[in-house]
Amino acid sequence: MGDDGQINLRRGFTLIELLVTIGIIALLLGILTPVLSGARESARRAACLSNLRQTGIGLQVYLNENRGILPYALPLDDSEIVGETGEPSPDSIMANIGPTVDSLEVFICPSDSDIPEAVYRLPQGPIGAHSSYEYWAGWLMLFRELNAFDRRPEVTVTRFYEFEREFPVLADSAPRHRGGPVYDQNAVYFGDWRADWMVLNPSED
């Protein structure tokens, strides 16, 4: 009621107006959600590449301190072999180049949703107990040791990488950041320690 004693009637939204408003909001959400999702994925990919660059720098430091020879290390992450304390195996890539990187967080991909629950229950969580990245050089060393009876597979594999610099040294252990039909997950390469897409078949690129 106004000051003059008259009743003021305020017109509210009609049902149709509310439905139109809700429809516009839903349409905007439908347009913006993929954009925001793509931005988040781009940020995760950039963080993943940054992780690999830092591990590459760590490997370069290791090479400088170990006569230019890559470390002999387990190819897989340590989730299934860590002890109760969560310490990485002394044969893991984390233990080998861990002292050369700023933080063991660089071994965890921001899109890695496959970290075992048991690792999260460790005192420090997955940091230092899990790696999202596979040490491809470790696979080659293991193959040389088992099939060629190579007593120093790390030397042989390092020489291989000197000639095959487009073969990944470390790569994301799952295709979390795919780049289309040709390029697979992120990887780091020997030589200049470039972090980039991993080519599925380098000979066809």
Image (cartoon, rainbow, N blue to C red):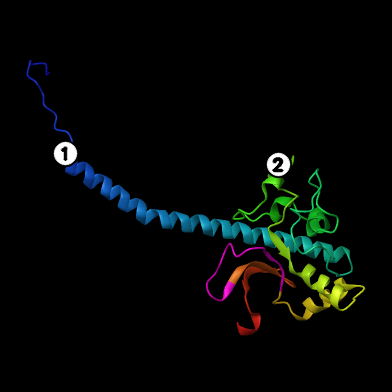
**Magenta segment, prevailing SS (helix, strand or loop):** loop
Q: CA distance from mark 1 to mark 2?
A: 54 Å
CA neighbours of label 1 inside 10 A, class few (<14), some (14 to 19), many (20+): few
Q: To which quarter of the image does residue 77 belong?
A: bottom right
The answer to whether marks 1 and 2 mark residues whose Cβ atoms lie closer than 8 Å is: no
Q: Which residue is situated farthest in the right direction here?
A: 151
Q: Earlier in the sequence, mark 1 or mark 2?
A: 1
Q: To which quarter of the image does residue 190 belong?
A: bottom right
| Residue shown at 65% from the left, 84% from the top | 203
| Left or right of residue 25, residue 158 in this image | right
Q: Position of residue 15 (x, y in %)?
A: 18, 40
Q: Secondary structure at mark 2?
A: loop
In the rendered image, which quarter contains the N terminus? top left
CA neighbours of label 2 inside 10 A, class few (<14), some (14 to 19), many (20+): few
Residue bounds of the magenta highlight: 168-183
Q: Secondary structure at mark 1?
A: loop
| Residue shown at 55% from the left, 56% from the top | 43
